[in-house]
Amino acid sequence: MASPPPQPPSTPHYSTLPSLFPLTGGCVCRKIRYTILAAPLAVNCCHCRWCQRETGASFALNAILEAQHVRHAPSPAAQPILSTIPSVSGAGQTLARCLDCGVVMWSNYAFHGPLTRIVRVGTLDEPDALRPDAHIFTESKQPWVELSGERAFVGYYDVEKVWRRESLERLEVLKPEVERWRRETGGKKMDALGG
Ligand SMILES: [Zn+2]
Ligand SMILES: [Zn+2]
């Protein structure tokens, strides 16, 4: 299926560098630290208005991983607070935020519920490690952001055509769990994750 997008020779695609992982990250005050154990399923640079507003910037850089591949300390003192906010789809997005410094480290979207975590690449200790596979919602891209030869989509994309074969295989493993979550919660609304 889709192969990794073309990259300059100096920056091999993260999926070709197993020694890159685990990657660590966390909030500004370091109360919450997390570890990414595997290569992301995909990394999206999202130019939608919601991401611009949430980050106060021009886009969000999001690494999608199975929730089991994003670990954080289990101690109660190091738990993020969860809040659900609107999203482009209307189904909502649940943000995981440090209570003390307020930084959002990851979120969950309705398409996979709690089974994936969407990690904000800027909170990694080495944010340069994960460059985007695709730019999405470029319909609201700020005009000064120039994309040269990178994969870009006006809205979202067909995952089957963009994700690496390995990612699609990992997604197949997740699907029964996602379906179970949808059945148990009676829908796709992120309110089901709790607040
Ligand atoms: Zn913090
Ligand atoms: Zn967005």
Image (tube, rainbow, N blue to C red):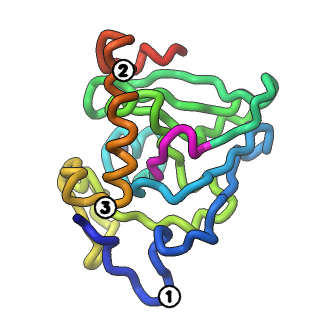
Secondary structure under tag 2 reads helix
Position of the C terminus, as image quadrant, is top right
Q: Is residue 11 above or below residue 176?
A: below
Q: Position of residue 7 (x, y in %)?
A: 38, 81
Looking at the picture, tell me which residue is in the foreground, 142 or 151.
Answer: 151
Q: Which residues are magenta?
A: 63-70
> Within 8 Å of ligand 2, the CB of disc 2?
no
**Does 89 sit left or right of 84 as displayed?**
left
Q: State the predominant SS element of the stretch in magenta.
A: strand
Q: Position of residue 154 (x, y in %)?
A: 18, 54
Instruction: Inspect the image, locate mark 2, and give the three-letter code of the amino acid beneath it.
Output: Arg
| Mark 3 vs mark 2, CA separation in Å | 24 Å
Residue count near mark 3 (Cα–Cα under 10 Å), binned few <14, some 14–19, many ≥20:
some
Q: Residue placed at 73% from the left, 46% from the top?
A: 28
Q: Evaluate if marks 2 and 1 touch, with contact meaning CB atoms under 8 Å apart.
A: no
Q: Residue placed at 42% from the left, 40% from the top?
A: 53
Secondary structure under tag 1 reads loop
| Mark 2 vs mark 1, CA separation in Å | 42 Å
- Of badges 3 and 1, nearer the viewer stands 3
Q: Is residue 119 above or below residue 67?
A: below
Q: Residue placed at 65% from the left, 59% from the top?
A: 23
Q: Residue placed at 37% from the left, 33% from the top?
A: 112
Name the residue beneath numbered marker 1. 10
Name the residue beneath numbered marker 2. 180
Looking at the picture, tell me which residue is in the foreground, 49 or 18.
Answer: 18
Name the residue beneath numbered marker 3. 165
